[in-house]
Amino acid sequence: MKASSDALPRQTKRYEQKRQAILDAAVRLFNQKGLKGTTLADVAQNVGLVTNSVTYYYRKKEELATACLLRSLTVLEELIAASLRAETPEARLRMILQLYVERLAESASGDQPPLMSFSDMRGLTSPHVELVFSTYNQMFRHLRGLFESDALPLSRAQRNARAHLLLSVMHGMRHWLDHYEPEDYGRVAERMSDILINGLAGQQSIWQPAILPPMAWPSADEISPEAFLRSATSLINEQGYRGASVEKISARLNVTKGSFYHHNDNKDDLVANCFERTFAVVRQVQRAAEVSGQTGWDRLCAAVSGLIAYQLSDQGPLLRISAFSALPEGLRRETKRTMDRLAQRFGGFAVDGMVDGSIRPLDPSVAAHLVDSMVNASVELEWWVPGITPETAADLYAKPLFVGIFAPEAEAQPSTNVRRAATSASG
């Protein structure tokens, strides 16, 4: 009897160790290949098991993906809970970023399991997607508590927009933090906190985005190459590269696969064109902002407002940064380089602003990545800030980064500039 009771804890411990090893391997593969591009056989091979051994722990791939996502959400909940114990909103923000980069550093060194990207969670099916989104929404509400204070009279929409901004730069960090040594992650978190809390503005700068010229862009009203690009971009954002099948892209447009191949040679070429379309939009807006703005601040405000308006317009969206991770290797490498170059153009605007005094002294590289992450995630604003429009998005979502995320402001109202920029972006 004693031998049996002694064996149970050892068996339970072995079971839990193997389960965690499976989760660790699965997270790395899901982050690398996407939800649709990873198989249970891939996970099994990674941990030296046969597929049937993995199904003993998780019967289906979606069960495994759900477990990975829930484990990462648990980590975020723990970080948020620790941060909320700080006395002031500013201290809470500094703590959440510091704890988050510490966890990323521990994951990079192998001391802690990796965190799973949330970019593919819309690719789950029922009942898994409901469970994950319910848990994610709960985490979002807890994070929103960082912005709740008697001294910070913000509306619910403003708190939602700021919470989404903070999550956006945290999630986005995982795409560029490897530019730094893990021992420097803490310093990066300090610079991020400084920018988020104190904003970008120099002493005399005022948030009033310039009006950009209308963008000449093909119509997607009819079945055309542009319509396929928009359909594919939306699906890739939601379900990843491999989740956006020819069948799903065609179904979204209510056309047949034959119509797809009439307009496109193959899916890989279409995806490459989706990236080129996104890059072309970003370049066009950045160039227009550079021409129209007298200062670095003016250029940066105009570019960000124009791109966010485009994201929420009938011509949007732009392709998410996370989409590149599941691309074929050759396409992934060049795509990542282009994305980094376009992000650093925001840094160039910041340097111009520091030279002319319109932007206060700060780390322009970190600022560029924050701006890029914010623009990238603005495509999801309608999910997290109900009622937001292209006319109000820049004020609610982008302005806090420029003037300070804790700046006590009245409810945002659409300015003439923002309204006209949104109209211009929608072409």
Image (cartoon, rainbow, N blue to C red):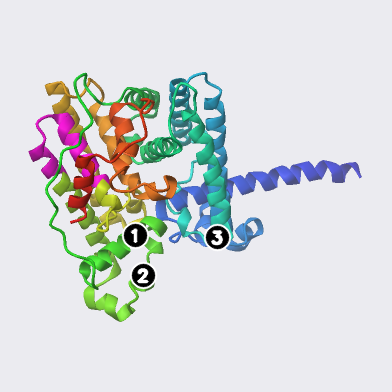
At mark 2, the secondary structure is: helix
For residue 167, above or below residue 263 = above
* Percent of width and height locating residue 368: 25, 34
Magenta region, main secondary structure: helix
| Residue visible at 20% across and 43% down in the picture | 342
The image quarter containing residue 228 is bottom left
| Within-10-Å neighbours for mark 2: few <14, some 14–19, many 20+ | few
Mark pair 1, 3: CA separation: 24 Å
The answer to whether mark 1 and mark 2 are in CB contact below 8 A is yes
* Percent of width and height locating residue 136: 52, 45
User: Which quarter shows the C terminus?
Assistant: bottom left
Q: Amino acid at mark 2?
A: Arg
Q: Nearer the viewer, mark 1 or mark 3?
A: 1
* Percent of width and height locating residue 53: 63, 59
Q: Nearer the viewer, mark 3 or mark 2?
A: 2
- The front one of 404 and 364 is 404
Q: Amino acid at mark 3?
A: Lys
The answer to whether mark 3 and mark 2 are in CB contact below 8 A is no
Q: Which residues are magenta?
A: 286-308
Q: Which residue is mark 3?
A: 61
Q: Is residue 26 left or right of residue 271?
A: right
Q: Amino acid at mark 1?
A: Ser
- The front one of 110 and 342 is 342
Q: Which residue is mark 2?
A: 252
Q: Is residue 181 magenta?
A: no
- The mark that comes first in sequence, 3 or 2, is 3
| Residue visible at 13% across and 51% down in the picture | 214
Q: Is residue 371 left or right of residue 131?
A: left
Q: Which residue is mark 1?
A: 234
